Amino acid sequence: MPESRVPFVAGNWKMYKTIAETESYVPALVAKLPVGKPVDIGLCVPFTDLAAAVAAVGDSEVRVLAQNMHQAPEGAFTGEIAAPMLLELGVHGVVLGHSERRRDFGETDRALQDKVPAAIAAGLEPVLCVGESEDEREAGETQRKLRHQVQEALLQVDDEQLADVVIAYEPIWAIGTGQVATPDQAQEAIAFIRALVGDRSEEAAARVRVIYGGSVNSENAGEILTQQDVDGALVGGASLDPVAFAEIVAATP
């Protein structure tokens, strides 16, 4: 990994942890994090935990991210959250297009075309999730799926802003299943994603951070994170334990 790309490790809590649990988790995590290691650390927490997480991280370097947002700054969208609401809480970024949002809640590539540039314009760092299903991989369609998802979601992002997006490669077959892409599989897919960005801007391709997600834990993180094009990890279940998550952060090269 070039020195110009600082590793990024984020924990996605999904629909876990109350405010009280957040207030006890964050200090436990901060106490276990390696000191002086060049890595950006994020916690992607439920909406109800955002304010508590921001307050708990204090002046540490841990960033707080939301798990979704609407593309409009306000409006008649019951149940949705807008970027200005996240900014008011001190949130740093937002996860967009997670496979669970796509599969269970109808998130579309068309919506992401609007959400990604809206996040950038608001000053939030978007973490764009892409990845293929097991059937698509077995059919040899991994690159076709990634090409479609990446190109569609970044369509309205200016070339000079492409590197402002973190892209998370999360093969759907490895999310929460215990299956993990091999280091070679992760490297191959992430290198392909970087090349897709390079089709738009070689300079952005050299700077954009592409991370891996899918059953990452403290035992397999080291081997995956040392791959040339892998710039970090989006961690699911293992991030719910502050000790295990800190060990993954420590495994970054």
Image (cartoon, helix red, strand yellow):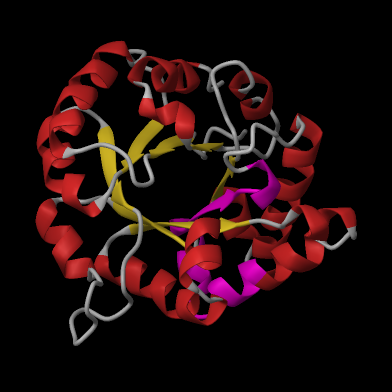
Of residues 37 and 62, which is closer to you in this image? 62
* Image quarter of the C terminus: top right
Write the start and end of the magenta stretch as one range. Answer: 149-174
The answer to if 107 sits in the magenta stretch is no
Rendered image quadrant of residue 37: top left
Say left or right for 122 vs 201.
left
* Image quarter of the N terminus: top right
Q: Residue at x 49, y 72 (%)?
A: 107
Rendered image quadrant of residue 62: top left
Q: Visible in this render: residue 39?
A: no
Rendered image quadrant of residue 196: bottom right
Residue 182 position in % (x across, y down): 77, 32
The answer to if 163 sits in the magenta stretch is yes
Instruction: Answer above or below: position of 5 versus 118.
Output: above
Q: Residue at x 79, y 40 (%)?
A: 185
Instruction: Answer above or below: position of 63 versus 165.
Output: above
Q: Visible in this render: residue 111?
A: yes
Residue 190 position in % (x across, y down): 69, 47
Of residues 118 and 103, which is closer to you in this image? 103
Residue lying farthest to the right in this orientation: 139
Say left or right for 178 vs 10.
right
Q: Residue at x 56, y 65 (%)?
A: 103
- How many circles with numbers are drawn on the protein? 0
Q: Residue at x 35, y 38 (%)?
A: 42
Say left or right for 76 vs 14.
left
Residue 162 position in % (x across, y down): 51, 64
